[in-house]
Image: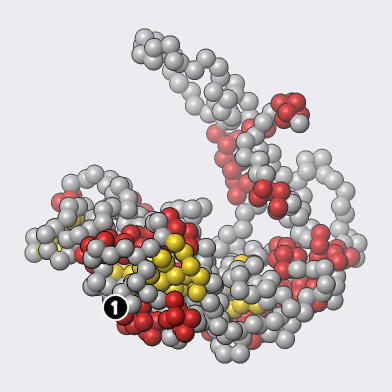
């Protein structure tokens, strides 16, 4: 097995002739040290040159700012260098394998970018007359048709802007449906293994959240669920495949039981990548499910945006879905922004966003779907599952695989049993940074002690998987052998081990001039 040639250990420093002596700049060759923009800038410099103008009389009634605004001033090249230097300290899918489980960090094909940048898509405005954006509406409509067909559902709301936003959309539609029935149901059931956004969504929509137990093999406990169902349960939220990387085999039985008890089934579709083209959630009795375009359909993950989380709905929930939606009629594509009296969205709960959703993500996702075709999408799921199982089987001799008896779906889940006393999952994750990888998802799902959740996606080659497996294996072997140096990792990152508790509890969010900061202490 090929192991990363640069697999560095602290004790190897001398042997490789490395020299820890500080440099004048703090830079280490191409690893550039970069101060905060406030530290390098002064507000007498500016990158823009305004012509002197006679200022019109102020209409602010004496409320003008009296002091300097204090924004950092840099010339254009200084600004460009600052952000480029910072960007080089970042890890990205274009640099290497991104093993974060539950996130589906897959390659973003360049074709998608080409399509999204076509002026007819990139330069349009949401308030343009509908007859001038027929092509854009056709794209939204075509993507919507693909999503409905791939899931075998009745309709889709395209506007939600992320998975979590889609969850809220689905739960609000469920609430509207229950209100239309005149029913007071105030509980949403969520399995213990759920992503944190599920209980957060239910609570945000005003529901009480109750946990459903998970069986020893990592799936929803159907009997416990059935016991709990009753006239107070509005919905269950189930992730399928679930966050343990397992397919919920009882999904149809779960849906039937929930429907019989008068509730609705929300499926968290974040893991759709594992089943796209192979399983249609509509066949499993799902009433609403979000699809993260930035996961399954390869659009970029942004720092909280721009994501896109369309929500597919069953026939039962379709009348309550949000506006707007695109409709194809004989004379072209229409944007339906008002409630209609028919069965389509006749009782819409309202809107999720001001406009129509993330056009740039729609064009990228449609480009991805059309370049793969139906058979290609099925292969995406198959290859993603194959890659995850390759990782699971390649590491199960050194890492505990708590549900590893059967094959997994798109992600491999490990626990920390066998790691030497005093060392932890965190130490393994930090040492992976030295190996040049973003760490895997850790301590999630909560049902596994010291969990490590690894999702390779279908876009990694066998050579890349082997190198990652080699790197992780070498770190785990050190952890099993009690190598205390792991506690200091990472050694090669721009910053060493951070005090994460302190960072979470007392984050320093505002830069202060050093003298002021000192005075405040
Ligand atoms: C990613 C994810 C979400 C949230 O999706 P965002 O697009 O990040 O808001 C919800 N549930 C699961 C299981 C996920 O993996």
The one nearer the camera, 390 or 67, is 67
Left or right: where 293 falls relative to 95 = left
The one nearer the camera, 512 or 94, is 512
Residue 363 sits in quarter:
bottom left
The one nearer the camera, 298 or 271, is 271
Quadrant where the C terminus lies?
top right
Count of numbered badges drawn on the protein: 1
Quadrant where the N terminus lies?
bottom right
The one nearer the camera, 343 or 493, is 343
Left or right: where 198 falls relative to 321 = right
| Residue plotted at (61% across, 86% down) | 404
User: What is the x, y in percent for residue 509?
Assistant: 62, 40
- Work out whether 245 lies above or below 98: below
Q: List the single residue furthest toward the bottom.
A: 406
| Residue plotted at (29% across, 69% down) | 313
- Work out whether 402 lies above or below 475: below
User: What is the x, y in percent for residue 447?
Assistant: 61, 74
Is residue 248 in view?
A: no
Mark 1 Cα shell of 10 Å, populated few (<14), some (14-19), many (≥20): some
User: What is the x, y in percent for residue 244?
Assistant: 56, 77
Instruction: Please give the residue where the numbered disc 1 appears in the rendered image.
Output: 152
| Residue plotted at (33% across, 77% down) | 261
């Amino acid at each position: 097995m090929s192991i990363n040639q640069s697999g560095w250990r602290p004790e190897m420093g001398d042997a490789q002739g490395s020299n820890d002596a500080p440099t004048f700049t703090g830079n280490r060759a191409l690893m550039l040290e970069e101060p905060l923009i406030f530290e390098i800038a002064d507000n007498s410099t500016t990158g823009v040159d305004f012509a002197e103008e006679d200022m019109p009389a102020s209409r602010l009634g004496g409320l003008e700012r009296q002091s300097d605004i204090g924004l950092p001033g840099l010339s254009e090249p200084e600004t460009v260098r600052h952000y480029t230097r910072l960007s080089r300290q970042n890890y990205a899918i274009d640099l290497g394998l991104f093993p974060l489980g539950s996130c589906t960090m897959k390659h973003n094909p360049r074709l998608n970018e080409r399509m999204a940048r076509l002026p007819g898509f990139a330069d349009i405005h949401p308030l343009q007359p509908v007859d001038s954006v027929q092509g854009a509406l056709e794209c939204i409509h075509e993507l919507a048709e693909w999503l409905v067909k791939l899931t075998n559902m009745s309709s889709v709301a395209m506007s939600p802007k992320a998975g979590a936003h889609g969850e809220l959309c689905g739960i609000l539609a469920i609430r509207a449906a229950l209100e239309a029935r005149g029913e007071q149901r105030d509980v949403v059931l969520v399995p213990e293994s759920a992503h944190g956004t599920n209980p957060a969504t239910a609570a945000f929509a005003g529901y009480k959240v109750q946990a459903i137990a998970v069986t020893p093999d990592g799936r929803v406990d159907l009997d416990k669920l059935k016991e709990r169902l009753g006239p107070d349960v509005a919905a269950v939220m189930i992730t399928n495949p679930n966050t343990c990387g397992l397919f919920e085999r009882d999904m149809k039985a779960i849906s039937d039981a929930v429907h019989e008890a008068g509730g609705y089934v929300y499926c968290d579709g974040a893991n759709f990548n594992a089943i796209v083209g192979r399983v249609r959630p509509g066949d499993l009795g799902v009433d609403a499910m979000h699809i993260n375009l930035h996961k399954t359909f390869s659009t970029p993950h942004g720092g909280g945006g721009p994501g896109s989380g369309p929500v597919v709905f069953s026939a039962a929930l379709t009348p309550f879905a949000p506006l707007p939606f695109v409709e194809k009629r004989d004379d072209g594509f229409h944007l339906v922004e008002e409630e209609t009296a028919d069965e389509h969205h006749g009782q819409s709960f309202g809107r999720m966003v001001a406009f129509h959703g993330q056009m740039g993500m729609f064009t990228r996702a449609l480009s991805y779907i059309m370049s793969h075709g139906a058979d290609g999408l099925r292969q995406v799921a198959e290859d993603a599952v194959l890659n995850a199982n390759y990782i699971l089987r390649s590491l199960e001799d050194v890492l505990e695989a708590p549900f590893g008896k059967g094959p997994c779906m798109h992600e491999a889940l490990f626990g920390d049993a066998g790691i030497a006393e005093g060392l932890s999952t965190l130490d393994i994750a930090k040492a992976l940074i030295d190996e040049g990888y973003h760490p895997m998802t850790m301590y999630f799902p909560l049902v596994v002690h010291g969990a490590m959740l690894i999702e390779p996606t279908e876009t990694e080659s066998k050579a890349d998987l082997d190198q990652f497996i080699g790197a992780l294996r070498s770190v785990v072997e050190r952890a099993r052998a009690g190598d205390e140096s792991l506690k200091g990792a990472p050694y090669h990152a721009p910053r060493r081990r951070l005090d994460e508790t302190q960072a979470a509890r007392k984050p320093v969010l505002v830069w202060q001039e050093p003298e002021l900061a000192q005075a405040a202490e």
